[in-house]
Image (cartoon, helix red, strand yellow):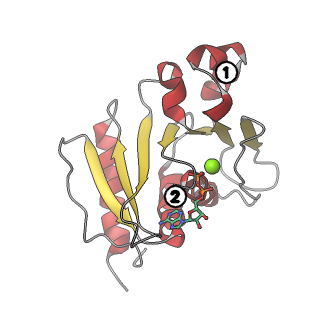
Amino acid sequence: MSEINSKNNNTGKSPHEWFWLSESSEQTEKFGFLLGKLAKANDVISLDGDLGAGKTALTRGIAGGLGLTGYVNSPTFTILMEHRTDKSGRMPLFHFDAYRLADAEAFYEGGFDEYLGMGGLTVIEWGELIADALPELTLYIRIERTDYDKPDQRKFSLSWPGCPERLTRVKEKFEDESIGC
Ligand SMILES: Nc1ncnc2c1ncn2[C@@H]1O[C@H](COP(=O)(O)OP(=O)(O)O)[C@@H](O)[C@H]1O
Ligand SMILES: [Mg+2]
């Protein structure tokens, strides 16, 4: 992952936070790919950030890292896109867009919480809207634009409050793969 720019890595303000800068959608997808490779069954990733921040781009990379070959699009009009392992992939991806869910209650009412324990990886765009329904071990990722002069730059803020060790593992892997050659 030599193209991922790690020069802005730091440990964040708290030991449970980590920031890095993506310079392109390709870098974002590569980072997603790494997250997909490191994912375990029943993991949950909450993605936040404005429209066009890169939540779906990241999810596309995550799907690739799981070995899923189907096309990952924004599930905006469906709330949930299921990517099963019929053709490929080491575990299913349950890709949510919570934008049209009012709150955690709507998530429960739709029966969507059942997916959290179905042995796949759950990725939830706009996860903060249903924050109360997210499990304790959720990985939180916020994606923000940085500078109007740098339209392709995004700041990633990651925290995994229920399991900081796994965030450290992601960081270490990221740094390993950023070392060139
Ligand atoms: N560094 C970057 N990371 C992710 N997307 C980027 C980046 N730079 C530019 N983009 C562009 O921003 C858009 C992100 O769209 P998308 O992933 O659908 O956002 P969201 O799902 O957050 O609404 C895409 O058009 C992508 O090409
Ligand atoms: Mg999206």
Q: Which residue is mark 2?
A: 32
The image quadrant of residue 120 is top right
Image vertical order of residue 101 relative to residue 27, above or below: above
Does residue 35 appear to the left or right of 109 in the view shown? left
In front: 113, or 20? 20
Q: Amino acid at mark 2?
A: Gly
Residue 105 at x, y = what percent? 60, 13
Judging by the rendered image, the residue that carries numbered circle 1 is 114
Left or right of 110: which side holds 157? left
Q: Dividing the image into four equal quarters, which quarter contains ligand 1?
A: bottom right
**x and y percent of residue 159 in the render?**
33, 41
Between 147 and 136, which is closer to the camera in this rendering? Answer: 147
Q: Residues within 10 Å of mark 2 (few under 14, many from 20)?
A: many
Dot 1 falls on a residue whose secondary structure is: helix
Question: From what the image shows, is residue 181 above or below residue 19?
Answer: below
Quarter containing the N terminus: bottom left
Mark 2 lies on a secondary structure that is helix
Q: Earlier in the sequence, mark 1 or mark 2?
A: 2
Q: Residue at x 42, y 39 (%)?
A: 140
Indicate if the residue with disc 1 has its beta carbon within 8 Å of ligand 2. no
Residue under the point 55% across and 37% down: 126
- Give me the residue at 57% from left, 55% from top: 52
Residue shown at 30% from the left, 69% from the top? 6
Q: Quadrant of the C terminus?
A: bottom left
Cα gap from disc 1 to disc 2, whole angstroms: 24 Å
